[in-house]
């Protein structure tokens, strides 16, 4: 049985889910997607995205083209 996610983990998973949707369904730049949920630096967003998905935001977007 898997332990329930912490609040922080849940928020991060939802943030990644929304970012994936925007990367696939819009032409927004990665920086614009990063600023929407409040990241001050797009690099921080990209680092978290890569840690959670194994791909950079641009690599993820490119896999759908």
Image: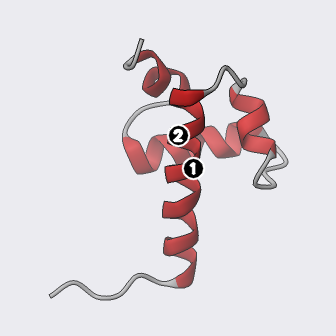
Residue 62 placement (x, y as % from top left): 45, 16
Q: Which mark is residue 65?
A: none
Residue 32 placement (x, y as % from top left): 78, 33
Q: Residue furthest top?
A: 65
- From this view, report whether residue 11 is shown above or below residue 36: below
Quarter of the rendering containing residue 37: bottom right
Q: Residue furthest right?
A: 40
| Residue sitting at x 51%, y 28% | 24
Residue 4 placement (x, y as % from top left): 35, 87
If the image is split into quadrants, where does the N terminus sit?
bottom left
In depth, the one of 29 and 25 nearer the eye is: 25
Secondary structure at badge 1 equals: helix
Q: Does 4 sit left or right of 47 as displayed?
A: left
Q: Residue furthest left?
A: 1
| Residue sitting at x 73%, y 42% | 34
| Residue sitting at x 71%, y 38% | 33
Secondary structure at badge 2 equals: helix
Q: How is the image coloured?
A: secondary structure
Q: Residues within 10 Å of mark 2 (few under 14, many from 20)?
A: few
- From this view, report whether residue 64 is shown above or below residue 32: above
Q: Does 1 sit left or right of 51 as displayed?
A: left
Residue 63 placement (x, y as % from top left): 37, 19
| Residue sitting at x 49%, y 72% | 9
Residue at the spot of label 2: 21
Residue at the spot of label 1: 18
Q: Does 51 sit left or right of 35 as displayed?
A: left
Q: CA distance from mark 1 to mark 2?
A: 5 Å
Pointer 1 with pointer 2, Cβ within 8 A: yes
Q: Residues within 10 Å of mark 1 (few under 14, many from 20)?
A: few
If the image is split into quadrants, where does the C terminus sit?
top left
């Amino acid at each position: 049985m898997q332990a329930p996610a912490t609040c922080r983990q849940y928020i991060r998973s939802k943030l990644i889910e929304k970012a994936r949707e925007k990367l696939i369904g819009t032409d927004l730049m990665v920086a614009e997607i990063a600023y929407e949920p409040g990241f001050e630096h797009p690099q921080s967003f990209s680092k978290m995205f890569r840690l959670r998905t194994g791909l950079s935001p641009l690599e993820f977007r490119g896999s759908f083209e």
